[in-house]
Amino acid sequence: MKRWAWLERDAAAFTANLQQMGARGGRGVIAVLKANAYGHGATWAARLAERAGAVAIAVATADEALALRTHGVLLPILVLGALPPDAVSDLARADVAVTIHQAAGLSDLVSAVPADARLAVHLMVDTGMHRLGVSPDQAPAVAARIEGESRLRLEGLYTHLATADSDQPAAAAQLTRFRQVVTNIAKRPPMVHALNSAGVLRLSFPEADLVRPGIALYGLSPFGQAHPAQGLKPVLRLLARAVQVHRLKPGDGVGYGFSYVAAQPMQVAVLPLGYADGYPRQLGGQAQVLWRSQRYPVVGRVSMDMLAVGLPADCPVAVGDLFTLIGQDGREQIFADELAALAATIGYDVVCGLSQRLEFSDR
Ligand SMILES: Cc1ncc(COP(=O)(O)O)c(C=O)c1O
């Protein structure tokens, strides 16, 4: 280990979460591994997903898909994001499926597919989110157009829910619109999918062949801190060892700007990670970390590569001691969602923001 700050990830937890999503959804799983598997390492997650019986993998960008192929991942891969035509030739050769989300530009996309290749495509339907997708009215015609193109193969049909975590009636209305499309389409492709993690946990859509969860695979709740993910196991722990310990007198300041000043004799343990590692800067003076299964505050500002933890003057903290910034230690645990609430964001943002400068250790 080259650094005393690292991410520990739990393969058994990831596998159990994926299997639970399949069981709850009653369907096969497309494992959403975009953004480096939400900060957990995409190749690692893809190998586990393959072993756990996932039907396919979804990523956001062409490079994410190609990197998985380079690492020998054989499962079907779908790029969920919008792509420029230039990306298509490499994806066709790597047997990666792309999303068609509008009729405009379809001819350019077809022209970009090499003559000896056939590009798998999933047609995305905008059932209300107004992000990507063809309208439900247009979908049958666009599907028919795809079917007529010899360089394309219509492999899937999908939609994405805007409010499965917050407004289930609105999400159910989206599913009703999608159901209509599934019924109206002349030739149903083999992969029909709609439900994200919150959808799997709160809704049902038996017309689909597959579910498409992301966050739940990593053991985080799509509903945030107020509703921890029942039965899901957090996969990631963020750990560090103290690199220096100081004894402070009343009036001594800590870190940039002396935003924290000791009121009484105390100790600070310096941990070698900061906001460049994805530990949000807003957490300075707000978050807690675990040492020997108890909570202690992050004091002063989080700097780019370091942060400080305040501890009582009389505790036996020492250089090399282990601290848990995200994860469980004994009976205490700090979820990414707790840090997200303090930083006024969501758990997704915290884990996706963890930097690739942190090494992984696996168990
Ligand atoms: C199109 C699409 N499908 C599925 C997901 C997975 O969503 P979640 O992580 O909430 O399960 C995402 C993630 O944002 C997405 O953009």
Image (cartoon, helix red, strand yellow):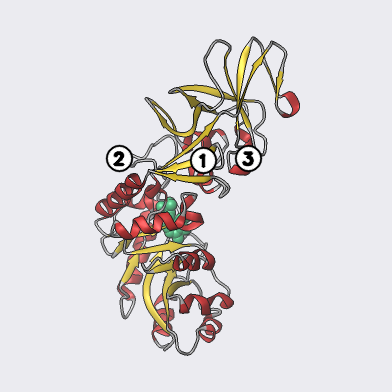
Number of labels in the image equals 3
- Disc 3 marks a residue whose amino acid type is Tyr
Q: Residue at x 51, y 62 (%)?
A: 130
Q: Amino acid at mark 2?
A: Gly
- Disc 3 crowd rating (10 Å Cα; few below 14, some 14-19, many 20+) is many
Circle on res. 6: 1
Identify the secondary structure beneath mark 1. Answer: strand
To which residue does mark 2 refer?
231
Q: Name the residue located 62 percent from the left edge and 35 percent from the top edge.
A: 282
Q: Is residue 94 left or right of 207 when viewed as pictured?
A: right
Q: Helix, strand, or loop for circle 2?
A: loop
Crowd tier of the residue under label 2, counting other residues whose Cα lies within 10 Å: few below 14, some 14–19, many 20 or above: few
Work out how far the residue at label 3 is from the one at label 2, CA to CA, in angstroms: 31 Å
In the rendered structure, which amino acid carries the disc numbered 1?
Answer: Trp
Asked if the beta carbon under badge 1 is closer than 8 A to the nearest atom of ligand 1, the reply is no
In this rendering, the label closer to the viewer, 1 or 2: 1
Frontmost of labels 3 and 2 is: 3
Residue 168 in view of the camera: no
Q: Is 183 located above or below residue 362 in the figure? A: below
Q: Which residue is mark 3?
A: 275
Q: Earlier in the sequence, mark 3 or mark 2?
A: 2
Q: Is mark 3 within 8 Å of ligand 1?
A: no
Q: Secondary structure at mark 3?
A: helix
Q: Position of residue 301 (x, y in %)?
A: 67, 30
Left or right side of 58 for 280: right
